[in-house]
């Protein structure tokens, strides 16, 4: 059991370290404040747990079995990613001007707690790959002889909690660089980069077969 747990946490680390839309969004929101970044993490990990629970009940098999259902989710996910990307690019554009104007713009675009949480949750739930991955990932670590459903839900909860800690380090690190990132030009450039990445990821998801 301890060996299985260590292997599971190691796999969770590799999964979290792989660059993806969630990582980009978390860093983007952390540019505004640690609160926004952390609430985005909580929203994302709520999605991770929900997909794990769905996989535990075997419902994600329906998604993989239905090409139409998968394609619908893929298009929805692409729209969500493109929406976040366009939003980031607009924020960067509004931040142009004098330093004072830029600071006011960043304050005006700082999201509420619910919006940050909802953004992280929506991004995760709109990604069909997250559902398919949960179905293929979690069963590998169910201990032999253990009840399948409770074990899968427990692993999903552990996976989400672990990633809260992991992505929390990203939020903390961005917060530590506050003096540098508070410069209007630097923050605007980072918004442009994150917006462009989210936009490209959305287009790629839309074009995938």
Image (cartoon, rainbow, N blue to C red):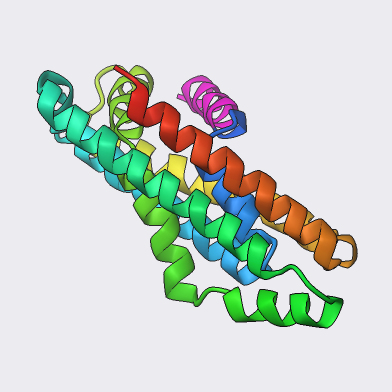
What is the magenta segment's predominant secondary structure? Answer: helix
Give x and y (percent) for residue 88: 57, 57
From what the image shows, is residue 207 above or below residue 37? above
- Who's the residue at 61% across and 81% down the image? 108
Residue lying at 52% horizontally and 65% vertically, measured from the top left: 39
Front in this rendered view, residue 34 or 147: 34
Q: How many numbered callouts? A: 0
Say if residue 190 shows up in the picture: yes
Where does residue 81 sit, x and y in percent of width and height?
43, 45
Q: Quadrant of the N terminus?
A: top left
Please say if 150 is above or below 68.
Answer: below
Q: Residue at x 43, y 59 (%)?
A: 119
Location of residue 97 with respect to 160 vertically, above or below: below
Q: Quadrant of residue 145?
A: top left
Q: Is residue 150 left or right of residue 15?
A: left
The answer to whether residue 173 is above or below residue 100 is above
Q: Nearer the viewer, residue 199 or 36?
A: 199
Quadrant in the picture for the C terminus: top left
The front one of 166 and 148 is 166
Q: Is residue 149 visible?
A: no
Q: Residue furthest right?
A: 179
- Left or right position of 119 against 180: left
Task: Classify residue 67 as left or right of residue 110.
Answer: left
Stretch in magenta: 1-15
State yes or no: residue 7 in magenta: yes
């Amino acid at each position: 059991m301890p060996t299985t747990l260590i292997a599971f946490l190691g796999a969770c680390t590799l999964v979290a370290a792989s660059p993806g839309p969630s990582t980009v969004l978390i860093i983007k929101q952390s540019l505004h404040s640690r609160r926004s970044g952390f609430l985005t993490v909580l929203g994302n990990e709520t999605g991770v747990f929900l997909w794990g629970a769905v996989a535990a009940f075997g419902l994600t098999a329906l998604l993989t079995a239905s090409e139409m259902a998968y394609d619908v989710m893929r298009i929805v996910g692409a729209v969500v990613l493109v929406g976040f990307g366009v939003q980031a690019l607009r924020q960067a554009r509004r931040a142009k001007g004098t330093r004072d104007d830029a600071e006011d713009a960043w304050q005006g675009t700082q999201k509420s707690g619910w919006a940050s949480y909802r953004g992280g949750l929506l991004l995760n739930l709109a990604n069909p790959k997250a559902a398919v991955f949960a179905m293929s990932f979690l069963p590998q670590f169910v201990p032999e002889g253990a009840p399948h459903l409770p074990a899968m839900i427990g692993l999903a909860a552990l996976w989400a909690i672990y990633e809260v800690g992991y992505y929390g380090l990203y939020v903390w690190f961005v917060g530590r660089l506050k003096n540098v990132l508070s410069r209007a030009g630097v923050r605007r450039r980072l918004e442009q980069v994150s917006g462009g990445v989210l936009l490209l990821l959305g287009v790629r998801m839309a074009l995938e077969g």
